[in-house]
Image (tube, helix red, strand yellow):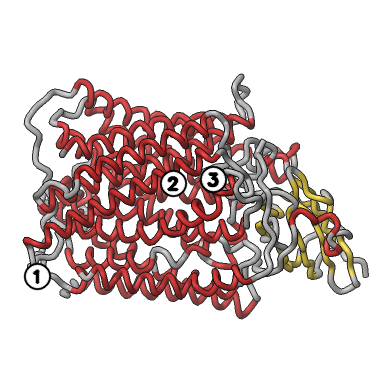
Amino acid sequence: MKRLSLAHFWVAIVAFGAASAMAFMQALSRASLDLPWRSAKLYYLSVTAHGVLMALVFTTFFIMAFGYVVAERTLGRPVAGPRLAWAGFWIAVAGTAAAAWAIFTGKATVLYTFYPPLKAHPAFYIGLTLLIVGSWLWGAVMLWSYRAWRRDQRDAPAPLAMHGMIATVIVWYIATAGVAAEALLQLIPWSLGLTATIDPLLSRMLFWYFGHPLVYFWLLPAYVIWYTLLPVAAGGKLFSDPLARLVFVLFILLSTPVGFHHQFMDPGVSAGWKLLHTLLTFAILFPSFVTAFSVTASMEVAGRMRGATGLFDWLGKLPWREPLFSSIALSMILFAAGGLGGAINASFGMNAVVHNTAWIQGHFHLTVGSAVALTFMGAAYWLVPRLSGRELELGLLARVQPYLWFIGMLLFSVSNHITGILGMPRRVFDASYEGSPAAVQWQGLTELSALGGVFLFASAAFFMLVMIGTGLAGKRREPEPIAWAEPLHPAPLRRTVFDRYGLWTAVAVVLVIIAYGYPLWHHLRMARFGSPGFSPF
Amino acid sequence: MNVPFYEKLWMWASAVLIVAFLTTIVAGLTGSALQPPSHVETIDPTKVWNDPRFTTRGATTDGQRTTVVNVAMMFAFEPAEIRVPAGQPVTFRLTSTDVTHGFQIVGTNANTMVVPGYISQFTTVFPLPGEYLIVCNEYCGLGHHVMAGKLIVEEARP
């Protein structure tokens, strides 16, 4: 069944490569270089392609691939329903192809948030819906595999990595209900001409109901990698097994009822509900704080097992040349800054200073663009040889690549945070505003961010070279087994309250109903006026 | 569940930090009414130009407060130049005739989404006279980056 995981990995890697090329074009455009192909049309097209391919295609396929690896290797049996799994793969591939066709032919330049009444070709909406349907089949295979395993293991708790992936699947099912409703009830009928108008604010509510837990769909598998593969790569043990289980359960509970913190500046949603979502948003900082401690402590354990005795010398004993380790360690540093920046974004009134400015792209390139993407790249170096039975080619590039990403992301992200504070809007082809004095002060910094983009592109190219080299020319040999981290103190042998997935899902749904039930009901009762569609060009 | 001492310490510190963050938000809310623009009012986006709420555009004042009525469209604000007095509350009322736009006055905390079918409203004070750049900060199509305006904050007349 390794073919199933590898097929998903390769689609993820191809999407990543295409998305990186799009990012490189944007970086050059940001530096205002006078290039022959530089045009507003191509810029906005490339922003759309970059966002969709990175945030929706690369992540989803990678997570599906990693989920199958976890299910098969930690449960020690083939996944249940392999035909369903392949059906999910092909549906997701077909959907991705349809959406990519619409984007690259210029029929869907609506960015990856696709806010109506900007209108795209129906193939774009239908394609993305199919991608999600494919991921639903993946989720079903994951849960089915777990249930099949449970029939033989009445009392044992799920292996920790599987626990994390089950949490990921639950978060994903709850979250995608929102975007599925937006696509099926609003976007698809409207783009096909079956309905004349659309309510843009309802779309935004449904989109962000999905859009924030989407980030935990990306992040939880990265946390699984931090908790269960990093200690092995570092040569140590997991600091605490039960705390990791607690973290994943908290994400099941709190991922979804927080979406209004993306809509602080929206009219039509009253401030009280925005405040409730703010409180829950801050609560969800807690599991990430716990993760920061546990994973750093696991690194210290590894350093001490490698012979460190002093207060800080364990840092130097860690395997900084091992790409999975360095990817995660560097991504955690960037994520610490990104997480605290996120607390600023979530700060209700203060959000007005940064909303829709360049600060935002600076922020999420530290979170999804570093904590998630860099971890996934490190994990690909670790997993692809172990799955394909081919040795990693171009190992030197793999060792350098995480550091290049780190430097590039620092340049890109720091400069975007500052230009954002100085008021530069995000997603603009050209930020000169006819030489307005406010715009002049952004200039040097936008060039710095473009330089960061060049580093990032070099890093992405290294990653692609290593992956393609490994896939085509890596020396064949008996693959090493995939080892999962042993906890420092023995893991519980019996199921605990953390294994009550049905219970946690029910509590999560209740929280969602509290946070969204009344605002949606109230919204639907209000006298509203629909919008016809508009083409972005 | 056996939680090691340092981890316990860290968890309590995290909880305290989160409560401190929330306290600043609630303090800002109750002390200086710092809250995001959250006005709830709807309008037919296809009839904005004839709607009495948007037929008189630009700034009007009753001596105490100024109201600014503005319409966002692909790819301009109408009117593109707004004059308001310094040091007085200014209430903005905006809507869109086409797609979703943003309205952000660079260098201030005036920032709102402008969603067709809805009226955005917020009140702020500009203490410093001068000329400010207004930008659209939500992607609205090919001319998004040229969608801009100007706010002139004038010394309040005695």
Q: Which residue is mark 2?
A: A129
Residue at 65 percent across and 70 percent down: it is A526
Left/right placement of residue A165 relative to residue A171 reads left
**A291 to A329, vertically: above or below:** below
Query: Which badge, 1 or 3, comes first in the chain's sequence?
Result: 3
Q: Position of residue A257 (x, y in %)?
A: 44, 67
Q: Which residue is mark 3?
A: A416
| Contact flag, marks 1 and 3 (Cβ < 8 Å) | no
Q: Check disc 3: other Cα within 10 Å, few if <14, some if 14-19, many if 20+.
A: many
Q: Which residue is mark 1?
A: A494
Q: Position of residue A332 (x, y in %)?
A: 33, 51
Foreground residue, A281 or A72? A72
Query: Which badge, 3 or 2, comes first in the chain's sequence?
Result: 2
Foreground residue, A494 or A351? A494
Q: Position of residue B90 (x, y in %)?
A: 79, 67
Measure the alpha-carbon separation of dots 1 and 3. Answer: 49 Å
**Which quadrant holds the N terminus of chain A?**
top left
Q: Chain of mark 2?
A: A
User: Do marks 1 and 3 share a chain?
Assistant: yes
| Contact flag, marks 2 and 1 (Cβ < 8 Å) | no
Q: Give the residue type at disc 3.
A: Asn
User: Do marks 2 and 1 share a chain?
Assistant: yes
Left/right placement of residue A522 relative to residue A60 reads right
Q: Secondary structure at mark 3?
A: helix
In front: mark 3 or mark 2? 2
Residue at 86 percent across and 74 percent down: it is B64
Q: Secondary structure at mark 1?
A: loop
Residue at 66 percent across and 50 percent down: it is A196
Q: Quadrant of residue A382?
A: top left
Measure the alpha-carbon separation of dots 3 and 2. Answer: 32 Å
